[in-house]
Amino acid sequence: MISYLIKSAICLVILLLVHRLLLQREAIYQFNRFFLLAAVMGSFLIPLIELEVAAEVPIVFSEDALQEVEFSPDFKLHTDLALASDFVPETELAAKSFDWNLLFWSLYGLITLVFMIRFIRNIKLLLDKINQNIHVQFRGETLVLLSEKSLPFSFLSYIFVSRDYFESDQLSDAIFAHEQAHVRGRHTWDNLLIESLLVPFWFHPGLYLARQAIKLNHEFIADEAALLVTPLDQYKTFLLAMMSPRQSTGLASSLNFSLTKKRFEMMKRSSANSAKWVKILFILPVFAVLVYFFSEKVTAQAEEGGNFESGEVQANQKDIEIGILLRADNKIEVDGQIIVIQELAELVKSKNPENTLVRFSAATDVDMGFLSDVQKVLRENDLRRVIYEDVKVQKVNQVDTVYTILYGRPLYTPAGFENNYGENSSFGKKPIGGTITIGSVSPKSTKATSSITEPVDSYIPSSTSYQKQATEFQLKITKSGIFTQPTNEEIEELRTQFLALDQTYFNLSMEDRRKVQRASFPYAKIEKDGRITYKKFELLTPEERNALGC
């Protein structure tokens, strides 16, 4: 939402700058009117336009290939159960957080309400003047005779003049022609459009600039009509005699709006046809550039190459085949020759992607990070035609996926994950003691300690890396709820990342743990009538707190 509004504001300011530099000083007032209206509407529409861009086709594995191999028992998590005494319930951490989202929307709603009340009030004031004063038909137009002294102005199909001013025959042909041009040009609708947009978008700087430019252009159009019935010098005299600090409401077209030297200069300006058309044609590439840079880029749907047993990659007689085998020792075997990944990059650079077919295989216990690096080399050299043969990759759960990305190794064995966070585990369920269990941390006991096997080459994270990850996670949590409530799927994904991050915290040494601020997860899982929802702890009702035991 913020990105959309920023793009919209930039588009409108650029278009208004083009109008100011190229079009405003040209006597093409009707074109300028529609250009300004198109600029306002276009600035809101351009960021919504979707442009397809070429997609990088990923090398993926099918679900069938991933399911063939069991999880390697060599990967185990080192968990210090002696840290149970340090466990702090997430409800206590979440209760201390302030709901900035609620404050933001409350403040925005209050200011928007003020602008809406002002907008409605201005319309009501003008309608009251129409209903409470005498109407007179004059030269095909409806005049509203006001009891108070006022300069002539127009709104909708009505021209408002002071009753004394009209009865003393001071309404000149030039002034009447000026206001008649506003009425017949339906300038009120332009003003209503801008003012209505300013109600929800009161913070939009471009709309205020557009309002000024549109109203000034209205006066250029009306001045042009007045000069058809009155000499220039005489018309200037009329306008100067009517100069007044009092202005009518912004919804009306006022005679003395922006009575400046620029307006007087425009009364005697004319434009050469050649220069006029050159400037008008220049507008088209400006719009095209804005669409290109500020539209929404959508990745084109491309065929996914390299899908195991998909049948999409077919070999033919013209193909030059390369056999790549990933070994468990992080070495690459290419057509029987052992090389390292740097040599692979040099080798594939000389290959033509059009007629090169890669036959790809990997050892069962190949490192996932190493596999990803090799895939990246193939993608960078545009080698998309890949057939996977005897690929054996360990399938991991969602928590393992996150943890593997962070540290290059899995977090849980399948049995361990099911025991801690599966459907039959105690995660998130109300125990007999009446408190919520977050994670699977349990107090020290002889039985628990004897069931833990010391891992081989366990990973011990540093306080610096953990704090960086925790800060990024908390920022992600904050951003996810600034304007909208995240979906259940988004919260589940955040919860998965939190579990991996929390286990990292328990892997820190006691000294490192004192240096960092532990990440928190602000959502409680609520099951009601068979439906699962998530709600922030500070927003829970007393009934929900009792049900959750917190």
Image (spheres, helix red, strand yellow):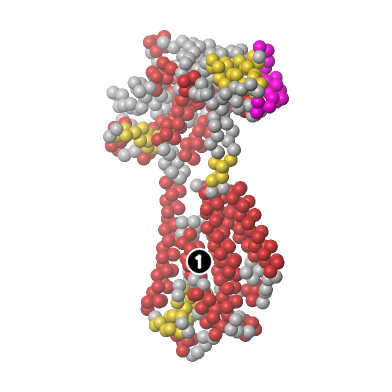
| Residue drawn at 48 percent across, 15 percent down | 69
Measured as percent of width and height from the top left, residue 417 is found at 42, 19
Measured as percent of width and height from the top left, residue 472 is found at 53, 34
Q: Is residue 47 visible?
A: yes
| Residue drawn at 28 percent across, 23 percent down | 432
Residue farthest top in this picture: 450
Question: Seen in the image, is 17 located left or right of residue 45?
Answer: right
| Residue drawn at 42 percent across, 46 percent down | 102
Whether 323 is drawn above or below 263: the answer is above
Measured as percent of width and height from the top left, residue 95 is found at 40, 36
**The image quarter in which residue 528 lies:** top left
Q: Which residues are magenta?
A: 336-355
Whether 519 is drawn above or below 404: the answer is below
**The image quarter in which residue 130 lies:** bottom left
Question: Seen in the image, is 330 located left or right of residue 194?
Answer: right
The residue tagged 1 is 190
Using the image as rendered, state which of residue 348 and residue 311 is in the foreground: 311
- Which three-letter amino acid code belongs to the residue tagged 1? Asp
